[in-house]
Amino acid sequence: MCAVCLRPRTTCICRWTAPVASAAGVLILQHPMEVANAKNSARLLHLCLPGSRLEVGEAFDAERLDALLAGPRRAVLLYPETPGDATPGAAPPPFDPAWTADPAGLLLVALDATWRKSRKMLHLNPALRRLPRLPLRDVPASHYLIRKAHAPDQLSTLEATAYALAQLEGDGDKYGPLIAAFDGFVGQLMQRCKPAA
């Protein structure tokens, strides 16, 4: 077992690690069912973003989650606008585009889960529902060739976070190394899944 990426040595992903220092802080909340999933990109994302934090859980202890979300940075949730999912009277506050003037003052919170499980995480964690949401705009098609997306704008956790950071910082090229690392990771998985000739 690799002590860094926590995968068997034969499937170690450390060679794909491409560290990029983000201006915004990053908190990755990973659903427990994703931890052992070989197709999961959150560990690679965490290894590529020095200073990021990766926490595993579904229903987080309220005090613990509040502590993770507490200042000095303003927490924003990387999640699409889903009006049908909102509880009446509990719509999240809007994301203020002026906040992008100081990306270092932001904490980007990314949920690493299937769509169904991410909705459950929102339901079980009221603190997440109260966060302003950052929806992605004008992103390229996913490079996640090993998982079937139900919609063209559905991305892996790594891709979504990289594009969100680029959007927040107004720098489309800075996070290219993360996407390249993800391409290597996907290619490695596809090699392993190829039937023997």
Image (spheres, grey):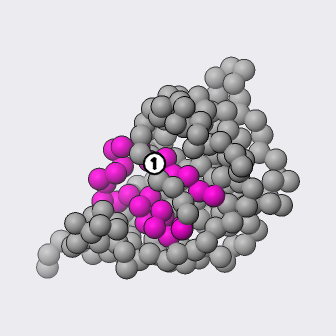
Picture quarter with the C terminus = bottom left
Quadrant in the rendering for residue 81? top right
Asked whether 28 falls inside the magenta stretch, the response is yes
Q: Which residues are magenta?
A: 25-50
In x, y percent, where is residue 14?
37, 74
- Of 156 and 6, nearer the camera is 6
The residue depicted at 42 percent of the width and 40 percent of the height is: 57
The residue depicted at 34 percent of the width and 66 percent of the height is: 5
Picture quarter with the N terminus = bottom left
The residue depicted at 69 percent of the width and 66 percent of the height is: 23
- Of 166 and 17, nearer the camera is 17
The correct choice, above or below, for 162 with respect to 63 in the image is: below
Quadrant in the rendering for residue 184? bottom left
In x, y percent, where is residue 68?
57, 44
167 relative position to 5: left or right: right
Q: Specify the amino acid type for callout 1.
A: Glu
Asked whether 120 falls inside the magenta stretch, the response is no
96 relative position to 40: left or right: right
Q: Count neighbours of disc 1 (C-alpha within 10 A) and say few if under 14, some if 14 to 19, many if 20 or more.
A: some
The correct choice, above or below, for 12 with respect to 153 in the image is: below
Q: Secondary structure at mark 1?
A: strand
Which residue bears the numbered disc 1? Answer: 55
The residue depicted at 71 percent of the width and 41 percent of the height is: 132
